[in-house]
Amino acid sequence: MNLTSTQILQWTARILSAASLLMLSAFLFGEDGLHPSRIKAHEWVGLFFFPFGVAVGLILGWWNERLGGIVAIASLLGFYLIYGWLVRGSMAMGWYFVLFASPGFLFLLSALMKSSVKKPLHN
């Protein structure tokens, strides 16, 4: 079986998204996981973008790589810009959020590679 670079990228994004979703689930639903009564109103803004928005994007990426990648990346940007900068006053929240959302970048790159392969050459 010969895999193309696009297929390798697609499956890498899928495998990493599954790993990312499993890790996020462990944080959310683990031993001392998410307790809605302990979450302040402004923190729900952050949770909307990360992990919920990123997770939706990573799940969508399995069926529609372009849409999933866009949703995951937009959610990550929303998390840093809206929650980090506007709500908290600082975007310095760590790189690990980008790490968890990184399959979204791979989904988008895979979709872009597929669309460039499908375009016919003009003479």
Image (tube, helix red, strand yellow):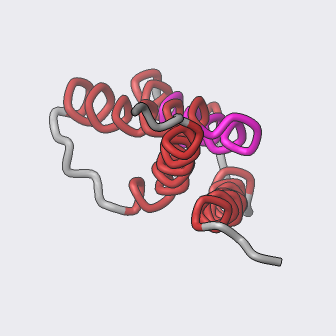
Instruction: Tell me what residue is drawn at x 68 percent, y 55 percent.
Output: 21
Q: Which residues are magenta?
A: 47-65
Magenta part mainly helix, strand or loop? helix
* 69 or 54, nearer to the observer: 69
Which residue extends farthest bottom?
1
Percent position (x, y) of residue 79? Answer: 37, 35
Instruction: Tell me what residue is drawn at x 60 percent, y 59 percent.
Output: 6
Which residue extends farthest right?
1
In the picture provided, is 30 more to the left or to the right than 81?
right
**Residue 99 shows in this picture:** yes
* 11 or 3, nearer to the observer: 3
Find out whether residue 55 is within the magenta segment: yes
| Residue 32, above or below 123 | below
Find out whether residue 70 is within the magenta segment: no
Instruction: Tell me what residue is drawn at x 57 percent, y 34 percent.
Output: 66
Percent position (x, y) of residue 87? Answer: 26, 26
Q: Quadrant of the C terminus?
A: top left
In the picture provided, is 97 more to the left or to the right than 119?
left
In the picture provided, is 51 more to the left or to the right than 122?
right
Q: Quadrant of the N terminus?
A: bottom right
Which residue extends farthest left?
89
Percent position (x, y) of residue 76? Answer: 41, 39
Instruction: Tell me what residue is drawn at x 44 percent, y 25 percent.
Output: 45
Instruction: Please identify the quarter of the rendering in which residue 86 is found.
Output: top left
Instruction: Please identify the quarter of the rendering in which residue 64 is found.
Output: top right
* 104 or 31, nearer to the observer: 104
**Residue 32 shows in this picture:** no
Percent position (x, y) of residue 94? Answer: 29, 59
* 89 or 22, nearer to the observer: 22
Figure label count: 0
